[in-house]
Amino acid sequence: MSRSLSRASVVTAILLTLSCAAPLPAVDDVLALEDDPLSGEPAEAPRTESITDWARELQLELDERASEARANAPSTGSSRSRELASLLAGSRALFDAADARILRAQIEQDPGSTLADVLTAEDEVARDVRAEVAALCAEGLDLAERALELEPESCRALLERGLHLSLLAWAEGAARALLAGRGPRVKNAIDRVQERCAEHEGGAPLRLAGRFRTQAPWPYRDTALAVRSLTRAVALEPNALNLLFLGDALYAAGDLEEASAAWSRALEAQGDGGRAVLQRELARRRVDRARLELR
C-alpha cells in the first residue's frame, strides 16, 4: 500500500468511526462566520467587557484565518517548499479554530462551585461542539499527513499530527477512543514529536505529551510523567498555557498546593495572543476554588 493510500485510509477510518456517533458537519459550514469578519492580531486584553464576548470574537477571528488558509491551498504545479508551507499553515489554522471552540465552550459554562467542576469543564462540552472540532481536526490531520509525505522529519508537521490526533480522540470521547484503538496511534504520534522535537515552539511537544498523560485513561495515564514533561515545558516557556496544564497535572498527581501555585503563576503569564486571556480566566477559576479547598 502506498503512503498516500495509507494516509487516506487512516483519515477515512477516523471519520467513519466519528460519524457513527453523529454525522460530522462540513468544514465550510463550521467556518461560516456568525457576524462580520474580524481582522488584526488578537490582543492581550479583552476588547469587550464580557469574557464570553471575548471568547466568541476570538473564535470568529481564528475561523476567518482558517478560511483564508484553506483558500490559499497549493495549486497544481506549486513548488515543494510552497506546498509544504501551505499545508502546515492550513493544518495549524484548522487546529487553532478547533481549539478556540473548546476554550469558548469552557468559558461559557457555569464554572460551578468546586474545583472538580472547573477541572471537568472540558468533559462537559456539548456534542455539536465536539462534532465541529472533529470535522476541523480531520481535515487538519489530512494536511499534516500530506506535509509529512513531503518532509517526514518536519517538527512542525509532526506536531500538527499529534495535536489533531489528540483533539480527535477528545472529540470522540476517552472511552470510545480507547475501545476503537485510538490510544496507540495518538501515543505514538505524541511520543515521536516529543522525542524528535521536544523544544520546538517553546516546548509545545512536551506540553502535548504532558496533557495527554494527564487526561488519558488507563493504560496511558501517567501523572508523574505528565508533571515531568510539563515542568520542562514551563522551564522553556513559562506561558499561561504551559502553567495552566502543569497545575492540572500536579493536581492529578495529588499536590493541590503546587497545583495552585502553578495556576497562580499562569494569572500573570503571557501567551498566545488572545487565547492567553481565556487561559488566564480558566486559571483564575481554578485558583479561586483551590483557595477554598486549601483553607
Image: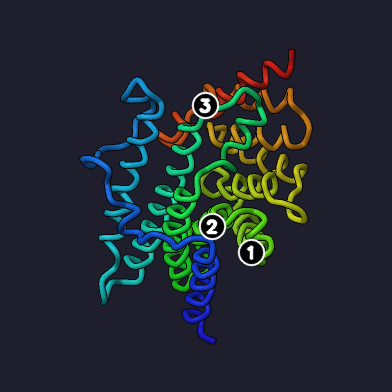
Q: Position of residue 24 (x, y in %)?
A: 43, 61
Read off the residue under disc 1: 182
| Residue 173 to residue 38: above or below | below
Circle 3 SS class? loop
Q: Nearer the viewer, residue 232 or 103?
A: 103
Label 3–label 2 contact, CB within 8 A: no
Task: Give the residue furthest to the left.
Answer: 36
- Image height check: is 150 above or below 97? below
Which one is earlier in the sequence, the residue at label 3 or at label 2?
2
Upstream in sequence: badge 2 or badge 1:
2
Q: Secondary structure at mark 1?
A: helix
123 versus 145 height, above or below: above
Task: Name the residue type under label 2.
Answer: Leu
Please name the colour scheme applied to the rendered image: rainbow
Hey, which quadrant is residue 283 in on the image?
A: top right
Tell me, for residue 168, which label it has, or none: 2
- Report the mark closest to the observer, 1 or 3: 1
Disc ID at residue 269: 3
Q: Which mark is residue 198?
A: none
